[in-house]
Amino acid sequence: MKTTLVFDYDGSLASIGGKEKLQQTFGISPIRIHKGLAQTKEIIKNLIQPVQRTTNHPLLNGSIVEDGFELSDKAKELELEFLIFDTASALGFQERNQLKLKRKIDTMDQRSWGLYGDSINSFIYNVCSLPIKTVFNFHIDRDKDVGGEIIDVPAIKGSSKNEIQKWFDVILFTRVTTDPKTKETQFFFQTKPEEGRFCKDRLGILPAIIPQDFSLIFEEYAKHGIEHPNILVLGESGTGKSRALASINKNNQLNLRKVS
């Protein structure tokens, strides 16, 4: 069974179940993070290691040395396939606290905001460059665009809220509706942009509304040659961001309703 490592920043995985259910769902236990980027990066460094590969190119004489990454032996043994960051909004909160502790200040000053933005942007860019599937869950904040219109942005604070979106293949917004007949709550992903919401489907292959089932996205992107798509999920609390992670392992999915 392939495994998924979840970095748990705020304990919201309770929507899936307790410790045994989480281990069954992901193949390995999630790791609770309390100290922001430093703790997260130290774990990733032990799972995915830098390598250099030599290749030839017909336009050049000799070989080219390319930098890359590969899974560690332990990660290969456990068939690690996914990295999940839930929720990355809480990661941002932790990182701001770590910065204030390190700089011995009570509130974020201009220099701290600059350091914070650089660190968050660099981290997400680097993770999205790794040879592994990733999902970042974020709460949303309301902001104004250049025209003064209200838009939904990742709740990450600082310049990062507008920068990080460009590094993802798919940006989803959670949607919740109630079936008028059964009164059941239904959870969906929105994949196409609309007023105030910058959704993204790099390949343009997904329906505008899909069930909250990540396997549908990974399967479609794999058909088009993208084995490791990076997914950003945005939504308010209680709209399925953490719940949907159960769909990573198709053998242990929650009851995810199909869109007709």
Image (cartoon, rainbow, N blue to C red):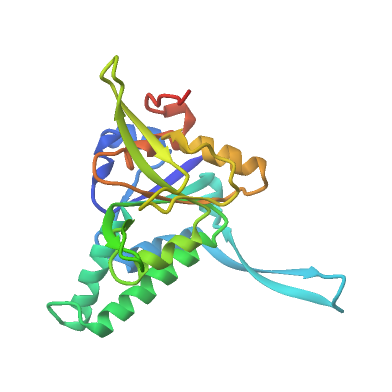
On screen, residue 80 above or below 55: above
Labels in figure, total: 0
Is residue 54 toward the left or the right of residue 10 in the image?
Answer: right
Q: Nearer the viewer, residue 169 or 88?
A: 169
Residue extending farthest to the bottom is 111
On screen, residue 149 above or below 243: below
Q: Is residue 124 visible?
A: yes
The residue under the point 34% across, 72% down is 159
Please state the horizontal and vertical placement of residue 150, each as a whole percent of the image.
29, 58
Is residue 189 toward the left or the right of residue 59 in the image?
Answer: left
Q: Nearer the viewer, residue 241 or 16?
A: 241
The residue under the point 60% across, 44% down is 221
Please state the horizontal and vertical placement of residue 249, each as a whole percent of the image.
46, 34
Q: Nearer the viewer, residue 100 or 167?
A: 167
Is residue 10 toward the left or the right of residue 214 in the image?
Answer: left
Q: Is residue 1 visible?
A: no
